[in-house]
Amino acid sequence: MSNPTSDFFFDAYNRDEIAYGLTPSASLAAFLDQFSRDGLDGGARALDLGAGAGRDTLAMARAGFHVTSVDISERGLQRIAERAKEFGVGDRVSTKVSDVRQFQMPANHYDVVIGTTVLDHVPAEDAKAVWSSMVGSLGDRGVLFVEVHTTEDPGSPVAPGCDNDAPVSETADAVVNYFSPNQLASWAIEPESKLRILNYEERLEWDYTHGAEHMHGKAILLAVRSGYHPKWYGQPAAFPRQPPPHSHDNNSSRV
C-alpha cells in the first residue's frame, strides 16, 4: 500500500465511501449512453488519465471498454482495481502508477481519452504538453472528455473565484493551474488539435461527493476527432428518434 505521507489523496481515497462518487459527469454519461451504440464498445480502448478513485474508469469498463487507468495515487488505483473486480469488470481495467507528464501515450491509439481534473493538477507550462499528447493519442474515431477547474472556483487565487466566499474543496491545494474563461475551448479549436466540439460548458457546481460541502468552478469539454460524425443527440439527449408505437394485433376482436 502507498505511504499516506507521500500520497496527497490517500485519505480521500482510503475512506469506505467512494470519493467523488460513482456517477460520471453528465456529458460522459451521455457519451456512454449514445456512442457505445455506434460501434465503439466491445473491445475499444480507453485511457483515463488522472483516474482518481475511478468513477470514470468503472463507468467505461461497465459499458464494455477496456480501460487503462493512470494516476499518481497508488491508493486510488488500488481502490479502482478492487471495485472493478467487485463489479465484475476486473478483466477490462488495467492500472498504471505514473505522473501524467511522464506517461507515454501512443499516437492514434485510443478510442476514448478522459482527463477529469488532471490538466489543472499540473503546472500551466506542462498542461499544454499533456493536452497535445492526449489529442495526439486519439484514433480517427476518437472521443475526448476533459474537465478542469476554472478561475471561477473559490480556490482560485485570482478573480472571480478569489472573491467567492463559498467553501473550498478539501483537495484544493492539489489544483495548481486554474483555467481562464474559454481557455479549454480555445485549445480544442486550434487546427493542430483536429477536434470537433460536441459539448462545452463552464459552470459553478456544489460538490458533496467528498469531504465537507464545497463549490467548484468547472469547464467541461466533450469533443470528437475532426471528420468523425457519430450519432449525437446532445446532452441531455434533445431530439432522439422515438420508438415506434406498438402495432395493433391483427387478430384482435372487432366491435
Image (cartoon, rainbow, N blue to C red):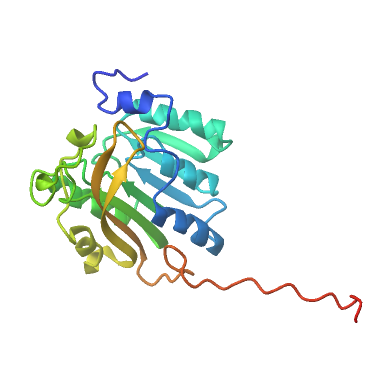
Q: Is residue 109 above or below residue 22?
A: below
Toward the front, the furthest residue is 255
Instruction: Residue 87 in the image: state x and y as whole percent.
Output: 56, 35
Q: Residue at x 30, y 45 (%)?
A: 206
How many marks overall?
Answer: 0
Q: Quadrant of the N terminus?
A: top left
**133, 220: nearer the viewer:** 220
**94, 206: nearer the viewer:** 206
Q: Is residue 143 visible?
A: yes
| Residue 165, picture quadrant | top left
Q: Is residue 110 visible?
A: no
Q: Quadrant of the C terminus?
A: bottom right
Instruction: Residue 244 in the image: state x and y as whole percent.
Output: 67, 74
Instruction: Residue 179 in the image: state x and y as whole percent.
Output: 17, 52
Toward the bottom, the furthest residue is 255
Q: Residue at x 11, y 52 (%)?
A: 160
| Residue 154, picture quadrant | top left
**Horizontal side of residue 158 vs 203, given as left or right:** left
Instruction: Residue 210 in the image: state x and y as whole percent.
Output: 33, 33
